[in-house]
Image: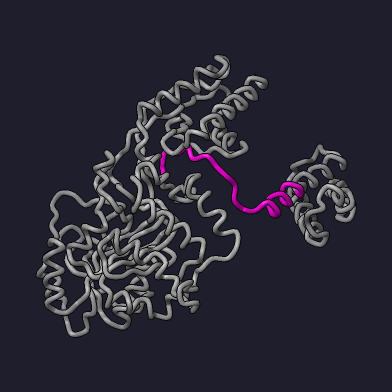
């Protein structure tokens, strides 16, 4: 093989620039040139390994043009793509957690097209405080004295610890040193906060006496963490929260509770597994409670901090607040979400609960309806069936509970299930399912009703493509 001759088939950068100048007017010429140069470099490496050895110079030029055009489209069209979540996991971290739904996005779309009163008091005409925008909503919904908002729950814990215990000790049970997705570990956050972690008890058993023995003049706070993404069962024990709070308050120590998911109403009333309700936790006497905005609340990514005014005011004055604060988009989305809890039933007003509470019988009916509308040849080549399934809420919410659902399941002929999954991901819009035991699953739990025709069309198009190759 003559590698020099192979490399000579590569197009010149300037030639490709000239060929693409008319078709890619939306991007600057110097940037277009850089992308083309990068694609030609990648193609050069491929030729050296023997790939594309039988391609002509014209074909290689066309490959560079196609790859460059795809890169230009991706760069100028924005990094986000609308996808259909057929994993069954409603609060899917990789897909953006809580979906906003059409009503929410329509409500705030016009609001965010111009300026808003983010830090401007319309009554006095003076500068306002953005944290006050949703403070009354949170006080009414949770029964607290005050609140603060930061960009996620990890930031909320970080701010609480840094504000109340920087350079001092915080007592925490070993059974609550949680790790959640993305390698987030509570001990790491505590270290970065400046607080010194004092571990007590064991993984499965902690007693009130353990907290008492660990108390010194350097102790600044007690931290409890809800095991929102795991359960310890069997030979276990831990003190009641009321016991810890009563003792801590006798020592003038604040008790911080990392609640995690943060439900605002009893999940059991919606036929869902139990999760602690923020207002009920507050009534137990916790001084500072932190939870997420994009989990069971059903809103944007945010860390909500609620509790006693004297402690929340310390958090609000912390210089870290400016580094961790949220922008106008988050506040607009959060305020809208909270308003739905004040005036509506969350099961109908919050898209997360529209999906979580969808009747599995209805979902099975939808799956069967899609199959019945397809050409039998497509159903056969995909070996497509409708099945009952079990899924989970996601993002560590209700972790040990399985939620009934229904799915379309394919065991395709001639290709692997991973190849089929890739075909659905390549569809426009991409449809994200999952592979299990040699099968490809499209679970309908997190699929909105208006997305069902898209799934049906995708199955038809992909099935016809497979038929044409069989």
Residue 188 in view, yes or no: no
Location of residue 60 by image quarter = top right
**In the shown orientation, is residue 431 left or right of residue 191?**
right
Among all residues in the image, which is located at the extreme front? 123
Location of residue 464 by image quarter = top right
Name the residue located 39 percent from the left edge and 80 percent from the top edge: 318
Q: Quadrant of the C terminus?
A: top right
Q: Position of residue 178 (x, y in %)?
A: 30, 60
**In the shown orientation, is residue 27 left or right of residue 430?**
right
- Which region is colored magenta? 68-90
Q: Position of residue 328 (x, y in %)?
A: 51, 65
Residue 412 in view, yes or no: yes
- Magenta highlight on residue 434: no
Q: Position of residue 462 (x, y in %)?
A: 61, 27
**Across the whole image, how many numbered discs are drawn on residues?**
0
Name the residue located 21 percent from the left edge and 67 percent from the top edge: 286
Among all residues in the image, which is located at the extreme bottom? 217
Q: Is residue 143 above or below residue 266?
A: below
Q: Is residue 222 above or below residue 152?
A: below
Name the residue located 57 percent from the left edge and 44 percent from the top edge: 82
- Magenta highlight on residue 73: yes
**In the shown orientation, is residue 111 left or right of residue 169?**
right
State the residue in front, 353 or 158: 353
State the residue in front, 49 or 310: 310
Q: Quadrant of the N terminus?
A: top right
Q: Position of residue 427 (x, y in %)?
A: 61, 36
Among all residues in the image, which is located at the extreme top? 376
State the residue in front, 428 or 451: 451
Name the residue located 36 percent from the left edge and 44 percent from the top edge: 393
**In the shown orientation, is residue 417 left or right of residue 47?**
left
State the residue in front, 63 or 138: 138
């Amino acid at each position: 093989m003559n590698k020099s001759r192979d490399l000579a088939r590569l197009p010149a950068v300037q030639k490709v620039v000239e060929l693409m100048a008319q078709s890619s007017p939306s991007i600057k010429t110097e940037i277009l040139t850089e992308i083309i140069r990068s694609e030609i470099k990648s193609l050069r490496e491929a030729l050296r390994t023997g790939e594309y050895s039988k391609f002509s110079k014209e074909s290689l030029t066309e490959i560079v043009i196609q790859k460059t055009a795809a890169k230009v489209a991706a760069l100028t069209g924005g990094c986000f793509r609308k996808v259909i979540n057929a994993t069954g996991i409603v609060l899917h971290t990789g897909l953006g957690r809580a979906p906003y739904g059409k009503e929410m996005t329509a409500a705030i779309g016009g609001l965010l097209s111009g300026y808003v009163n983010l830090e401007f008091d319309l009554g006095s005409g003076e500068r306002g405080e953005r944290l006050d925008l949703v403070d009354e909503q949170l006080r009414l919904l949770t029964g607290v004295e005050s609140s603060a908002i930061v960009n996620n729950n990890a930031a909320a814990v970080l701010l609480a610890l840094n504000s109340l215990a920087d350079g001092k000790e915080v007592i925490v049970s070993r059974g609550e040193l949680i790790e959640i997705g993305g390698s987030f570990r509570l001990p790491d956050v505590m270290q970065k906060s400046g607080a010194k972690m004092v571990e007590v008890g064991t993984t499965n058993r902690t007693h009130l006496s353990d907290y008492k023995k660990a108390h010194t003049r350097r102790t600044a706070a007690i931290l409890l963490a809800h095991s929102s993404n795991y359960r310890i069962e069997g030979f276990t024990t831990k003190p009641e929260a009321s016991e810890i709070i009563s003792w801590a308050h006798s020592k003038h120590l604040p008790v911080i509770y990392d609640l995690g998911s943060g439900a605002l109403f009893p999940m059991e009333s919606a036929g869902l597994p139990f999760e602690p309700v923020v207002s009920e936790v507050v009534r137990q006497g916790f001084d500072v409670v932190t939870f997420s905005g994009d989990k069971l609340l059903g809103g944007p990514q945010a860390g909500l901090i609620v509790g006693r005014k004297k402690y929340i005011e310390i958090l609000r004055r912390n210089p870290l607040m400016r580094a961790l604060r949220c922008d106008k988009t988050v506040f607009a989305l959060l305020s809208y979400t909270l308003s739905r809890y004040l005036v509506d039933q969350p099961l109908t007003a919050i898209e997360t609960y529209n999906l979580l509470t969808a009747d599995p019988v209805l979902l099975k009916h939808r799956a069967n309806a899609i199959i019945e509308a397809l050409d039998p040849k497509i159903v056969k080549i995909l070996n497509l069936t409708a099945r009952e399934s079990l899924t989970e809420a996601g993002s560590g919410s209700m972790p040990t509970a399985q939620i009934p659902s229904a799915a379309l399941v394919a065991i395709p002929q001639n290709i692997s299930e991973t190849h089929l999954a890739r075909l659905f991901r390549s569809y426009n819009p991409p449809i994200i399912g999952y592979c299990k035991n040699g099968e490809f699953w499209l679970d309908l739990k997190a699929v909105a009703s208006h997305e069902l025709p898209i799934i049906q069309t995708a199955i038809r198009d992909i099935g016809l493509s497979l038929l044409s190759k069989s």
